[in-house]
Image (tube, coloured by chain):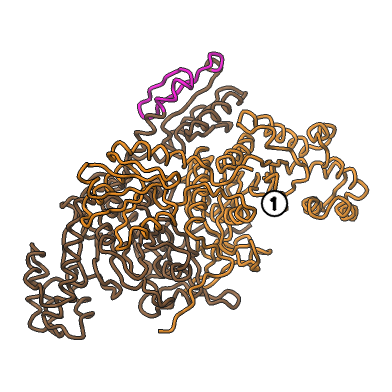
Chain colours: A brown, B orange
């Protein structure tokens, strides 16, 4: 029979078992952190009708979309988790309780140009808090706390959450003479990091801000932004509102558990999307700024305007997990000390009768120990090599002597220590070492 | 602005938050059970090249497939988790350790005719054990144990795992004079449950088994199948091998923790697919036979023959989770006692200064308590109603008196009991009640 070559599409991440367990560990910790903050899980279809998914049409996104017909239906694969959320909230408005706090961890699809580190199928991990008509500023203050706890739980220490407020920027633009091209000014500032100050100033000078471009860039670059901004108080309503919001957000961060080493007001964070209307967030790993923001988002005023007349303001953030995992692996930050074995104990029966080994496996499993039973017809060396290759922490040997004495021999594969005793006596020690290993975070301390 | 109607495609399950939490609880318990048995997680792309996915072409499946082109690529959405596994094992053969035990819980796609209880996007929860060249019979004996522990962990008590062996059937066919239409005989027997004995016998009589059809049906219907089968020992090699396998599988089930109330040899279980070559499994909820099998699978000799010359025998089962959830809900078996609130504690600050409430939320979260902070500008009644609607178990009130005394007031929303004390003192009680609630299984005892 002629064979089909077993290949995976380029731009689609498919991991070997050890990496997959690390990926899942990261995903689990993100989920756990979202749940600690009282977000409810949501799962929406990956396929939606194109009419629904592309209600807000246009732009780069639409070109990248996976769109096709099935029967008479015009279908698309979701390209983010925000549009499905908007649909969901509009559709189920009457049955939801607001503020509606949901998290979703799921795959999204974008047919980007294939290149290293770019994925066409990737996980996003999103949280959003949606208000019905209004949503208090404290929700914006809480978000950095979620980011902080989430990344800490992954094992990262050295990262900074950068905060800004779009009202502050828009107000400042107005004060400095920007007329109807504020969106263009915003987009230009957003490029500051990439193209540098000189180039940015040149581009700005051509816009309505004109000669004030230098002044604007000075303000944005200030080391004491709140002090700097205070000078513009009372000149513009939007600005004043934004400044109050920025103060409210930063004021509570300490109580929310975010140390001042881990956040900073950064007035150059604009986030290109027109969508955002208040606080915006970006998160950078200090040692790897080239990775870019690993968690971003912000406040928006109208989640679902394409589906409903209800005003649904919200705030949300997103972690691009697949890309994050790829770059962590790439720069060597994945923690190889994490147990990536599929089981904690491998039982190797040394007698022809497997019954005692089966009973032992059942006993361990009932105690919640992840257990495998090795019953293949192989030499002893091959059996131990199986345990070695998988990195199984403990091997339990069950020979005639052990069975006669009601004992088992357990070998700690890391220390090569070997103890013979009753399973009940050994259980506590095994459990303790498993628990200690579980405390090892998936990302290496940097 | 004209609005797009926010709708979800028919045949796609999208749950409200309470149901979603129950769904996730079931999915988590299935995953946990798979992990206890030492299966490693796998995540493969939802999109594959059509050439790879449809290597084994033809039949009903191909008609149902979501297939489309993107650029020059002919793509398809996976319609099960077995074909992607075959591709994965063939592709990564050199880097895997065998027996390779993997689980995968993921969405698959079939464009079936839309009807109630049929889904076009649905979760499958699969485990498979793949051997390299050979795979011992104990792997087949272990599978019912996984099924048993998984369904018990969901809260189901009254179910039966039905076992058969394809070699026994094929051997029996040969002994009874079946010639080259054994696949047709197998398919006919598979219909026995649906069409009844009379009709089955009529259909069989037209096949090569002819006059022996009645005898065959008598054997299949036996109350003591192993005794009945023993009489045919020594007449056919395949039969003898199958009978030995069937005995080996049932012999160890007690040690594997499966009580004899929960399994039965059922010689009428044929499972239509040609694919299976040894033990086959089906699982029925006793009170709801009309639901059909909720977990099925079997032994196969060649997982990946379309991709590789390597012989990769295996055994696996699959739970169709989306359909299972739908029918459990439909017959009222979902447990409404499960906590479906997104948090365990809702903190309601009663002062204008939110700082103490924020600090309390941070303290609770650090202790691993799922906590929400209610800071919207609403009347007290609306705040309590928010907790009520979400079914939050505890509300923590923080007024001036409490703050002055370093205490909090906690209301148990189920008992309406209200206690004022230090957070540290109340924590243990809250934790205990949360843990007790977590022991409630997602499926009601029947």
Residue A124 in percent (x, y) is at 38, 60
Q: Is residue A209 magenta?
A: no
The residue labelled by disc 1 is B292
Q: Quadrant of residue B3?
A: bottom left
Compare residues A77 and B328 and report the one nearer the observer: B328
Crowding near the residue tagged with mark 1, few <14, some 14–19, many ≥20 C-alpha atoms within 10 Å: few
Image position of A329 with respect to A417: above or below: below
Residue A388 in percent (x, y) is at 43, 34
Judge from the rendering whether residue A125 lies leftward or rightward of residue B36; answer left or right. Answer: left
User: Pointer 1 indicates a residue of which chain?
Assistant: B
Compare residues A149 and B409 and report the one nearer the observer: B409
Image position of A233 with respect to B425: above or below: below
Judge from the rendering whether residue A110 lies leftward or rightward of residue A405; answer left or right. Answer: left
| Residue A13 shows up from this direction | yes
| Residue A292 shows up from this direction | no
Residue A418 in percent (x, y) is at 41, 21
Judge from the rendering whether residue A122 lies leftward or rightward of residue A350; answer left or right. Answer: left
**Which residue occupies 68% across, 48% down?**
B276
Q: On the rendered image, what quadrant is the C terminus of chain B found in? A: top right
Compare residues B204 and B350 and report the one nearer the observer: B350
Residue farthest right in this picture: B211
Compare residues B333 and B68 and report the one nearer the observer: B333
Image position of A358 with respect to A257: above or below: above
Extent of the magenta region? A403-430
Residue B98 in percent (x, y) is at 52, 40
């Amino acid at each position: 029979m002629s064979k089909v070559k077993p290949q995976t599409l380029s731009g689609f991440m498919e991991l070997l078992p050890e990496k997959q367990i690390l990926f899942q560990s990261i995903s689990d910790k993100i989920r756990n952190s979202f749940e600690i903050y009282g977000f409810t899980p949501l799962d929406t279809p990956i396929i939606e009708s194109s009419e629904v998914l592309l209600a807000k049409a246009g732009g780069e996104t639409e070109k990248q979309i996976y769109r096709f017909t099935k029967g008479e239906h015009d279908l698309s694969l979701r390209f983010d988790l925000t549009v499905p959320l908007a649909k969901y909230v509009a559709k189920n408005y009457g049955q939801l309780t607001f503020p509606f706090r949901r998290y979703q961890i799921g795959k999204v699809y974008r047919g980007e140009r294939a290149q290293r580190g770019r994925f066409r199928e990737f996980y996003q991990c999103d949280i959003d808090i949606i208000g019905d008509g209004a949503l208090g500023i404290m929700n914006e203050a809480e978000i950095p706390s979620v980011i902080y706890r989430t990344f800490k739980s992954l094992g990262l220490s050295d990262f900074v959450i950068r905060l800004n407020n779009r009202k502050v920027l828009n107000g400042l633009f107005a004060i400095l003479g920007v007329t109807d091209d504020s969106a263009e000014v915003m987009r230009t500032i957003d490029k500051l990091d990439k193209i540098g100050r000189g180039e940015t100033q040149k581009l700005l000078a051509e816009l309505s801000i004109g000669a004030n471009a230098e002044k604007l860039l000075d303000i944005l670059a200030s080391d004491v932004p709140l002090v700097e901004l205070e000078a513009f108080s009372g000149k513009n309503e939007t600005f004043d509102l934004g400044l109050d919001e920025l103060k409210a957000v930063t004021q509570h961060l300490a109580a929310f558990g975010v140390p001042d080493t881990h956040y900073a007001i950064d007035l150059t964070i604009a986030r290109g999307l027109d969508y955002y209307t208040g606080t915006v967030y970006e998160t950078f790993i200090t040692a790897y700024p080239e990775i870019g923001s690993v968690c971003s988002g912000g406040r928006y005023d109208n989640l679902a305007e394409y589906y409903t007349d209800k005003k649904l303001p919200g705030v949300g953030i997103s972690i691009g997990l697949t890309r994050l995992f790829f770059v962590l692996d790439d720069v060597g930050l994945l923690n190889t000390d994490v147990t990536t074995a599929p089981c904690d104990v491998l039982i190797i029966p040394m007698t022809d009768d497997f019954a005692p080994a089966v009973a032992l496996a059942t006993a361990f499993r009932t105690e919640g120990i992840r257990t495998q039973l090795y019953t293949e017809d192989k030499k002893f060396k091959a059996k131990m090599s199986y345990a070695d290759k998988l990195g199984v922490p403990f091997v339990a040997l069950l020979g005639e002597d052990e069975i006669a004495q009601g004992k088992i021999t357990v070998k700690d594969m890391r220390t090569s220590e070997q103890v013979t005793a009753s399973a009940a006596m050994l259980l506590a020690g095994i459990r303790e070492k498993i628990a200690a290993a579980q405390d090892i975070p998936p990302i290496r301390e940097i």
